Image (tube, rainbow, N blue to C red):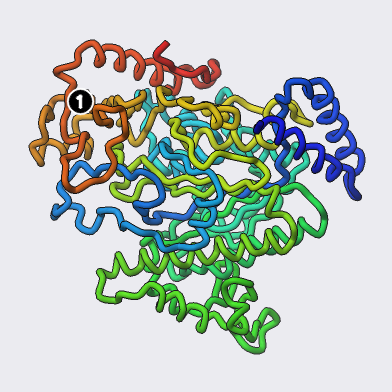
C-alpha cells in the first residue's frame, strides 16, 4: 500500500521538474524518473521523490521523556556527580511535538558519536567520524590505532594525498544534492571547518565550497572561542532559514536546508543571550541608528516576532514567561528557555512551509546531536537520541523500532529524493557507512538485530539487538564511572564490557528510577562466547575505519555484521 501510495504521489509531483530556468536539466530528470516508473509500475517499487529536505539539529538540547524511550542512566538518580541530569518528563513543546505526532518516531535512534562536532560529521556525511580525511591522515602519520575520534579532527576538509580524502568537495550529502539539481543552504552552528586564521567571510566561502549555495546566520563553532561576545540569536537563524525557503518557493526549486540552532549550548548562556538585542548578529549590528544597515525593529517572523509588531523584546518576554520557574538552577532554566526558543523556530519554519505550499512534500528530520545525560561518553545516556521524521506525502508509520543511527540520515534522504539509485550525476555519489531505512520502516521487526557502532576518543562500543559491547581504554571516563561507583563486574583493568539492555521480553529498559540500570552490570565474565563474537565484530569495525595505508589504500565500507 505504501509503495502504491509513493507511485501515485510521484505522478502528482513529477511535472514540477519541467519548469522555467533550468529546463534541460529538469526535462532530463523527469524523463529518467518517468522511464523508471514505467518499467517498475507493475510492482510499485519506485520510491517517491520528495521535493525538499530539512535536517533540524539543535545543539545540546534536552532529551524529553515523552519523545521516545529514554536511556536508563547508569548512575544513581540522586547522584552528586551528574546532578539534574535525569530526564524532564514532559516536553510541552507544541511544534516539535507536532512533527512527532504527525510523523514517524525512531524508537531506537543513536548518534554515532556523543559530541556535537563528531555527531554533525556523521549526519552530513553518512559516515563514522573516524572516516574523516583529516583524522585518517593524522592517525596514519602518527600510527594511532584506534583513531582518536575527537572534534578538531572531524571536519569537512579535502586532504589531497589521502585516498577518498575529499570530505568537502565530494563526500557529503550537500554536494550530492547540489550536483543533482537541488538548491542547498545552511543556517546556524557549523563546527565542521578548520577556522584557524579565517574571518567570517572566509569561513563562509569554505562552507559554500563544501556543497552549500547559501550559508547565512552562521556561527562557525562554539561561541566561547574567537566568537566570544556573539550570543545565541534564534530569530536571526530562523529568519534566514525562512528567507531561503521562501526564495526557492518563488523559484520553484527543489532544495535541501541544514538548520543548526546554537541553543541551548552553554557556551553562551541562553538566559543572558535572550536579553541581548536580536538585531546584534554574527554578521553585524543592525541596531545602530544612522548606519546603512539600521533596522528600526527586529526580524519579522510569523510565529515569533510578527505577532508583536516585529518587537523582539516583546516576543522574548513570552519565551521567559513560558519557561516559568526562575527558581531552577541557571543551567536548567537556560535549557528550558532554549527548548522553547527552538520550538518557536520549528513552528515559524513549519508555518513558512505551509504558507508557501511546500509542507506536504518536504521531509523534516528533527534530532538531537547527542544524548543529553552524559556528553562525550558511550553510555546510553550519551549516544541515544530522539529522532522524528515528518513527511506528509510519505505515508510513514507512526514509529519504527529498528536500530538507526546518524550515519543513516544521508542514505535515507538521498533515497527518498530518488538520487541514491537514480542520480542525475552518478559521479556525485560516494560510499557511506549508513544505509537507507526508507524501505525498512514498513516491515515489522526490521533492523531490530542490526549492529551499530559508536566512537569517541579511542573508546568504542557496539549494539547488536539487546546486547551492548564496549571496548574501553584504561583511562576512559566510562570505566572510571563504573569503578568509582562499584558497579557489578567492573574492574579498573577490565576494558571489555557486555551489558544486556533489554528485559526478559526483549523490550528496551528505558529510564525508571525504581530499578537499577542495565549498564551498571557488566556480564562479560559470564558470557565468554558473546565476548569472543563481539570482540571479533569490533575488530572488523576497527580494521575498516582505521587509517590503514591512508595514502595508497582506499577505506572499506562494507558493513560489519554478525552473519
Residue 252 placement, left or right of 164: right
- Residue positioned most to the front: 1
Which residue carries the number 1 mark? 495
Q: Would you say residue 110 is visible in this rendering?
A: no
Residue at screen point 63% across, 27% down: 430
In front of the other: 430 or 507? 507
Q: Pick the residue in front: 157 or 529.
A: 529
> Is residue 209 placed above or below 280 in the rendered structure?
above
- Give me the residue at 57% from left, 73% from top: 304
Query: 337 above or below 553?
Result: below
Q: Where is residue 117 in the image (x, y as percent from the top left)?
A: 45, 45
Circle 1 sits in a helix, a strand or a loop, which is it?
Answer: loop
User: Quarter-wise, where is residue 403 in the image?
Assistant: top left
In the image, residue 202 sits, relative to residue 563, either above or below, namely below
Extreme bottom residue here? 290
Residue in view at x 64 percent, y 64 percent: 351
Amino acid at each position: 500500500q505504501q509503495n502504491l501510495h509513493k507511485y501515485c504521489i510521484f505522478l502528482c509531483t513529477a511535472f514540477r521538474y519541467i519548469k522555467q530556468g533550468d529546463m534541460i536539466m529538469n526535462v532530463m530528470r523527469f524523463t529518467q524518473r518517468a522511464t523508471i516508473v514505467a518499467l517498475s509500475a507493475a510492482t510499485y517499487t519506485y520510491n517517491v521523490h520528495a521535493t525538499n529536505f530539512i535536517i533540524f539539529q539543535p545543539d545540546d538540547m534536552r532529551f524529553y521523556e515523552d519523545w521516545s524511550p529514554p536511556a536508563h542512566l547508569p548512575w544513581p538518580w540522586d547522584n552528586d556527580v551528574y546532578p539534574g541530569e535525569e530526564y524532564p518528563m514532559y516536553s510541552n513543546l507544541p511544534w516539535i511535538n507536532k512533527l512527532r505526532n504527525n510523523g514517524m518516531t525512531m524508537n531506537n535512534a543513536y548518534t554515532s558519536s556523543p559530541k556535537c562536532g563528531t555527531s554533525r560529521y556523521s549526519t552530513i556525511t553518512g559516515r563514522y567520524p573516524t572516516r574523516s580525511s583529516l583524522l585518517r591522515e593524522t592517525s596514519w602519520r602518527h600510527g594511532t590505532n584506534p583513531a582518536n575520534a575527537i572534534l578538531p579532527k572531524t571536519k569537512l576538509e579535502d586532504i589531497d594525498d589521502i585516498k577518498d580524502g575529499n570530505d568537502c568537495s565530494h563526500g557529503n550529502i550537500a554536494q550530492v544534492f547540489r550536483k543533482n539539481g537541488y538548491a542547498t543552504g545552511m543556517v546556524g552552528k557549523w563546527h565542521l571547518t578548520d577556522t584557524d586564521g579565517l574571518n567570517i567571510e572566509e569561513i563562509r566561502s569554505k562552507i559554500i565550497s563544501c556543497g552549500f549555495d547559501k550559508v547565512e546566520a552562521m556561527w562557525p563553532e562554539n561561541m566561547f572561542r574567537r566568537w566570544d561576545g556573539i550570543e545565541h540569536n534564534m530569530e536571526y537563524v530562523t529568519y534566514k532559514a525562512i528567507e531561503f525557503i521562501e526564495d526557492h518557493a518563488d523559484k520553484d526549486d527543489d532544495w535541501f536546508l541544514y538548520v543548526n540552532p546554537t541553543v541551548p549550548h552553554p557556551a553562551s548562556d541562553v538566559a543572558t543571550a535572550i536579553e541581548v538585542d536580536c538585531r546584534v548578529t554574527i554578521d553585524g549590528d543592525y541596531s545602530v541608528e544612522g548606519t546603512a544597515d539600521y533596522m528600526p525593529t527586529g526580524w519579522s517572523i510569523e510565529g515569533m516576532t510578527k505577532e508583536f509588531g516585529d518587537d523582539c523584546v516583546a516576543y522574548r518576554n513570552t519565551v521567559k514567561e513560558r519557561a516559568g520557574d526562575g527558581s531552577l538552577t541557571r543551567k536548567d532554566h537556560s535549557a528550558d528557555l532554549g527548548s522553547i526558543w527552538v520550538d518557536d523556530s520549528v513552528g515559524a519554519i513549519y508555518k513558512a512551509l505551509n504558507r508557501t505550499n511546500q509542507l506536504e512534500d518536504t521531509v523534516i528530520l528533527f534530532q538531537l546531536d547527542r544524548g543529553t545525560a552524559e556528553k562525550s561518553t558511550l553510555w546510553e545516556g550519551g549516544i541515544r537520541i530522539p529522532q522524528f521524521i515528518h513527511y506528509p506525502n510519505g505515508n510513514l508509520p507512526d514509529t519504527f523500532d529498528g536500530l538507526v543511527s546518524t550515519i543513516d540520515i544521508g542514505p535515507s534522504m538521498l533515497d527518498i529524493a530518488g538520487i541514491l539509485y537514480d542520480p542525475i550525476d552518478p559521479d556525485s555519489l560516494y560510499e557511506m557507512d549508513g544505509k537507507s531505512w526508507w524501505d525498512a520502516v514498513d516491515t515489522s521487526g526490521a533492523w531490530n538485530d542490526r549492529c551499530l557502532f559508536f566512537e569517541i576518543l579511542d573508546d568504542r562500543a557496539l549494539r547488536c539487538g539487546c546486547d551492548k559491547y564496549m571496548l574501553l581504554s584504561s583511562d576512559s571516563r566510562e570505566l572510571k564511572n563504573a569503578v568509582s561507583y562499584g558497579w557489578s563486574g567492573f574492574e579498573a583493568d577490565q576494558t571489555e564490557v557486555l551489558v544486556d539492555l533489554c528485559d526478559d521480553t526483549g523490550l528496551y529498559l528505558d529510564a525508571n528510577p525504581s530499578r537499577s540500570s542495565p549498564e551498571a552490570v557488566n556480564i562479560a565474565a559470564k558470557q565468554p562466547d558473546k565476548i569472543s563474537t563481539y570482540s571479533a565484530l569490533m575488530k572488523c569495525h576497527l580494521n575498516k575505519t582505521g587509517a590503514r595505508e591512508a595514502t595508497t589504500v582506499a577505506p572499506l565500507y562494507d558493513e560489519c555484521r554478525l552473519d
